[in-house]
Each structure stands twice: as structure tokens, then as C-alpha cells.
């Protein structure tokens, strides 16, 4: 009886000691996270919470004016502009994401072959990606010039009338922005596909060749399945990137013609910084964020199921 | 034969891809007011000169913006990598109870992009009196969690024996980070660092909003303010774009291998 009590007392003391030591090592470990955490808290966590709070108020550039509850959200959801610009953002996703991924895959497949000056060609495809959005926007703004631009000159060479008003005709403007964006970012897509292609073991191809599989069948049954993980990541990445479209339209079209290329981010920008309605703009951001997160969740769910 | 066709297609596509950049360079080197339109303009090289460059550098603050972009890019990259590495070390090598909680909070930073918190970010920056200050661009640049994520993965690969051997030699936590983990993840840090630098150099929307004076402007955001409120000739616009593009192109050519590796790593693992 005595020994048991003595033992349990000794055990409790030891536990206390380890707990105290645990507490100290806990603090020490957290200390290493703190340098990252401070700017992260001030310039990310706080603005996220602050944005939610601001969205419940009428808020001008001078500060809070009054609490209005969910009025901002109600106002937004009743405003046809909100749906229009949301649709613009989505239509850009529908144009840009498939084209950039198919083109990126194509370029990756070409560069993956043993072609002449392969490194040079790979660099040519990737190079635009390192330029800033303002540089690429200015280049394409003038490449698409209807009278003196090389794009229309090239079309004329192929016998078209060459009178396409790329950036002022609402039937062409989204294509113009898609072409510029594809050119700018396809190198990134290609590089990720190239990394994926390198992970497919060469003997799979050898075995298929021995079995008499043609090039198309090898592509269909070995390459595509081998790239499925990379493809999923890329689709996800490109959807989010397309939803964030701002720089290209701000510089190339200013949201025009009319408001044909006004996107969600530009809507938020104009509401907040041109009209000084911070509260309303915060509500727009929150709704947009919720939609993006919903997208991420759906995609996560879909890919998860396929992998399981 | 088949091979030959593929080579030609690849070469043509590559040409198509660099065409916009060649066009930009050519227009910028032509005398102000001349257009590059027909094939003849492409092959006549006798009138090429750098007058436009002299003019743009003299009439704008473009060199100053380039310098600002460089300073901001380097500071953001170095500080972000250092802080990320410290946090990654803690998550990877120091077992602590609230680790999961901290990790989730930090990783949540991947979910919401800066574009979605512009308004409150501006408000916060305004309160901190950092509007029109280069730290307004640097500090939010330090919140990207991708570096923590990637460096943690690499630190997880540092063998346990190394850590234990260093502990026996008397290294405490800081020593483990500085003498063991940091050197062993150097190449990963370079790759992630290059990725951060590109992000910072090309950052557009936030600097466009938070910097108001010409002297603190960075290149990507300064270019539109400078080119839009002017009735400038095409040659001048392309010259300014070329000045902004050339440093990036040169750096790309020099560090190509690292850049491609850094981008593909950050893309796939992130």
C-alpha cells in the first residue's frame, strides 16, 4: 500500500516536471513561428476579419459611418450588375482555363520530344511568364491595334478583311484578353506538365510499344492517366487565377467596351477606390471569396473521390 | 520525316511566341514616329537607334522605379524566406502540442487571395500610416504561406541522425536550424526565393493602390500611370515596356534552370 502511494507520488512529480519542461519547449517552438506570424496576423488575418466587420457598415474613405447589418449584402444581391460582373469573371474562366491547359499540354508534349534546340524552344514558351502584367498588357494592347497592329496585318496576309476591332468590339474583346493571357501564362502550365511527364516511367511506353500500341493509344492510356494529378492541380490553379483577372482588363480595355470586360475584382476596385464605398466593396469581396472557397471545396471533393 | 515536321512546328511556334517581344524591341529602336508595319520595316535596320531610350529615361522616373522594384523584391524575398524557414523548422523538427493549430492557421492563408481583402488591407495600411511607403508592399508580401509549406517538406527530409548528432554536439534549437537545417535546404530556398522574387517584381494591383507618389512607385504599377496620362507615341510606349522587360529577360536567361525548377516545384507541391 505504502509503496504504491510512494510510487504514484513519484510519478506525479515526474509528470509535473515533464509538464513544466513541455510548457517551456512549447513556448520555444512557438517563438520560431512568431516572426512569420506577426506580419501574417497584421496583413492577412486581421484584414480578413476586418473585412467581414466592414461589410456590415456604411464605410467611406474617412471611416465608419453607421452599422447597417446585412443591408450591403441585400443591396448587392438585388443589383443586376453584381450578377453581370460575376458572370464576366466566370466566362473568362470558361475561355481561359481550357485553352491554356490544352495549349500548355501541347507545348509540353512537343518540348518533351527530342527536338532541335530544345532548351531554346522551351525558353521561348516560358519567357512571357516572367514579364509583369503591365508589360504584357501594353504589348498586346498595341498588337491588337485595329489599324496598325500586327495581329490584323497578319490576318490580312491570310486574306481576311483585317477589320477586327479586337478591343472595342464586345464579340472579340474576351478572345483578345484570353489570347494575351494564354500567351503570358501558358509557359507556367507547360513547365508543370513537363515535370509530370518526367515522372511517367519510360518502360511503360516500351511495354506498350511491344504490345503494338500506336502513338495515340499510348497517349490515351499512358500519358493522360500519368498526368491526371498534375492536370487536377492545374485546373484548380487556373480557375482561381482566372477569377482574379484584373491587370489585363484594367490596362487593355478599362473594363470596356461599355462594361463588357468589367470583372469582379475590377468591380470591387471601382466600388471601393473610385466610389469610396468601402463597406459595400467589402461585402462584394466577402461574397466573391465565399464563391471561390465553394469552388475550391467542390473541386477538392471531386478529386478526392477519384483518388480514393 | 515525322520528326522533321515536329521540328518545324516547334520552331514556328517558338517564333510566334517571341514575336511580340521582338516587335516591342524593334518598335522601340525605330525613330520616334515611325511605324513597323510591312516586312520592309522589319528588315531595314539602318535607322535603328537608342534615342527613344535616352528620352524615356530622361523624361520619366523609370530607372528609379526599376531600383524600387529591385529593392522591394530583394527585401521581400530575403525576409520572407528567412521567416518561412524558421517557421518551417519549428513545424518540422520541434514537436509541440499546438503545432497543428498554428499550422492550419498559416496554411489557411492559401485560401483567400490578396485581391479579396484589398479594402480592409488598404484600411489597415492607412491606419499604420504606411500608404505610399515601400513597406506597404513588403510587409503584405511576407504573408505568403507557400514558403512555409515547401520548406517544411524539405526539412522533413533532413535525416533524424543529423539532428541527433548535432544535439549530442551540444546544439540547441537555434543551432539545429542554423547549422543543420538551413544549409541542407539551401537549394530549396533558392528555388522558392526565385519564385517569391518573380511574384514581387510582377505584383501589380496592390502597389497600384498603395503607392501614390511617383518617387515610391514600382515598375509594374508605374508603367500604366506613366503611359496612360500621356499622348505618347507607340515607339515611346514600347521603349518604356522594353526597359521594364529587359532586366527580367536577362535575369531569366541567366538563371533559367533555377527559375523553371522553382516555378514547377512551387506549382506542383503548392
Image (cartoon, helix red, strand yellow):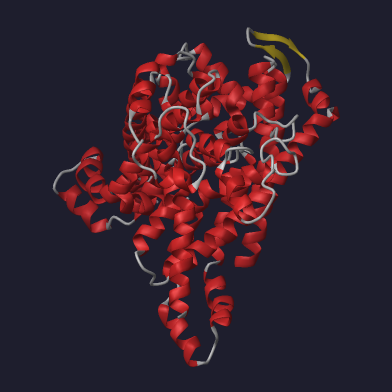
> Taking A86 as reference, is B220 left or right?
left
> Do we see residue A27 in this rendering?
yes
Above or below residue B17? Residue A50 is above
Q: How many marks?
A: 0
Above or below residue B193? Residue B209 is above
What percent of the width, then of the height, locates residue B104?
Answer: 52, 42
- Farthest residue toward the bottom? A211
- Farthest residue toward the right? A78
What percent of the width, then of the height, locates residue A145?
Answer: 60, 37
What percent of the width, then of the height, locates residue B8?
Answer: 45, 68
What percent of the width, then of the height, locates residue B264?
Answer: 42, 54
* Image quadrant containing the N terminus of chain B: bottom left
User: In terms of image quadrants, where is residue A52?
Assistant: top right
Residue at the image point whose x is 25% and y is 40% from the top: B173
Q: Nearer the viewer, residue A168 or A158?
A: A158
> Taking A210 as reference, is B246 left or right?
left
> Taking A249 as reference, is B27 left or right?
left
> Do we see residue B268 in this rendering?
no
User: In terms of image quadrants, where is residue A19?
Assistant: top left
Residue at the image point whose x is 51% and y is 21% from the top: B225
Above or below residue A144? Residue A222 is below
Q: Nearer the viewer, residue B219 or A203?
A: B219
Amino acid at each position: 500500500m505504502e509503496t504504491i502511494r510512494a510510487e504514484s507520488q513519484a510519478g506525479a512529480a515526474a509528470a509535473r516536471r515533464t509538464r513544466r519542461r513541455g510548457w517551456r519547449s512549447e513556448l520555444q517552438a512557438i517563438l520560431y513561428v512568431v516572426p512569420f506570424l506577426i506580419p501574417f496576423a497584421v496583413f492577412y488575418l486581421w484584414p480578413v476579419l476586418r473585412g467581414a466587420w466592414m461589410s456590415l457598415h456604411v464605410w467611406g474613405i474617412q471611416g465608419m459611418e453607421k452599422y447597417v447589418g446585412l443591408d450591403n449584402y441585400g443591396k448587392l444581391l438585388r443589383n443586376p450588375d453584381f450578377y453581370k460582373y460575376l458572370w464576366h469573371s466566370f466566362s473568362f474562366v470558361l475561355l481561359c482555363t481550357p485553352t491554356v491547359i490544352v495549349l500548355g499540354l501541347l507545348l509540353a508534349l512537343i518540348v518533351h520530344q527530342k527536338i532541335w534546340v530544345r532548351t531554346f524552344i522551351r525558353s521561348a514558351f516560358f519567357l512571357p511568364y516572367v514579364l509583369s502584367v503591365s508589360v504584357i498588357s501594353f504589348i498586346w494592347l498595341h498588337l491588337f491595334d485595329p489599324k496598325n497592329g500586327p495581329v490584323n496585318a497578319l490576318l490580312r496576309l491570310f486574306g481576311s478583311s483585317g477589320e477586327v476591332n479586337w478591343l472595342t468590339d464586345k464579340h472579340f474583346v474576351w478572345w483578345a484578353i484570353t489570347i494575351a493571357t494564354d500567351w503570358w501564362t501558358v509557359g507556367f502550365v507547360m513547365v508543370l506538365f513537363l515535370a509530370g511527364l518526367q515522372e511517367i516511367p519510360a518502360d511503360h511506353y516500351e511495354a506498350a510499344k511491344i504490345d503494338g500500341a500506336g502513338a495515340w493509344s499510348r497517349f490515351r492510356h499512358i500519358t493522360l492517366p500519368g498526368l491526371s494529378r498534375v492536370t487536377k492541380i492545374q485546373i484548380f490553379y487556373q480557375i482561381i487565377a482566372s477569377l482574379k483577372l484584373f491587370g489585363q482588363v484594367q490596362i487593355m480595355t478599362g473594363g470596356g467596351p461599355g462594361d463588357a470586360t468589367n470583372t469582379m475584382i475590377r468591380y470591387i476596385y471601382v466600388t471601393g477606390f473610385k466610389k469610396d464605398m468601402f463597406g459595400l466593396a467589402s461585402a462584394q469581396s466577402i461574397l466573391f471569396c465565399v464563391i471561390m472557397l465553394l469552388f475550391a471545396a467542390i473541386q477538392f471533393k471531386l478529386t478526392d473521390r477519384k483518388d480514393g | 520525316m515525322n520528326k522533321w515536321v515536329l521540328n518545324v512546328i516547334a520552331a514556328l511556334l517558338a517564333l510566334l511566341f517571341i514575336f511580340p517581344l521582338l516587335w516591342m524591341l524593334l518598335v522601340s529602336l525605330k525613330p520616334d514616329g515611325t511605324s513597323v508595319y510591312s516586312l520592309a520595316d522589319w528588315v531595314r535596320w539602318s535607322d535603328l537607334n537608342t534615342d527613344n531610350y535616352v528620352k524615356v529615361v530622361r523624361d520619366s522616373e523609370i530607372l528609379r522605379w526599376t531600383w524600387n522594384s529591385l529593392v522591394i523584391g530583394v527585401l521581400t524575398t530575403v525576409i520572407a524566406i528567412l521567416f518561412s524557414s524558421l517557421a518551417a523548422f519549428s513545424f518540422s523538427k520541434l514537436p509541440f502540442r499546438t503545432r497543428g493549430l498554428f499550422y492550419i492557421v498559416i496554411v489557411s492563408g492559401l485560401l483567400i487571395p490578396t485581391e479579396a481583402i484589398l479594402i480592409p488591407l488598404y484600411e489597415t495600411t492607412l491606419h499604420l500610416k504606411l500608404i505610399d511607403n515601400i513597406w506597404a508592399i513588403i510587409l503584405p508580401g511576407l504573408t505568403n504561406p507557400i514558403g512555409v509549406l515547401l520548406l517544411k517538406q524539405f526539412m522533413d527530409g533532413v535525416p533524424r541522425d543529423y539532428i541527433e548528432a548535432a544535439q549530442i554536439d551540444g546544439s540547441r534549437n537555434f543551432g539545429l536550424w542554423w547549422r543543420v537545417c538551413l544549409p541542407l535546404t539551401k537549394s530549396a530556398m533558392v528555388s522558392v526565393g526565385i519564385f517569391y522574387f518573380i511574384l514581387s517584381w510582377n505584383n501589380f494591383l496592390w502597389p497600384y493602390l498603395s503607392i501614390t507618389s511617383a518617387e515610391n512607385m514600382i515598375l509594374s504599377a508605374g508603367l500604366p500611370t506613366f503611359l496612360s496620362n500621356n499622348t505618347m507615341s507607340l515607339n515611346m510606349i514600347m521603349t518604356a515596356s522594353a526597359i521594364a522587360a529587359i532586366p527580367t529577360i536577362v535575369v531569366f536567361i541567366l538563371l533559367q534552370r533555377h527559375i523553371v525548377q522553382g516555378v514547377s516545384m512551387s506549382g506542383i507541391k503548392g
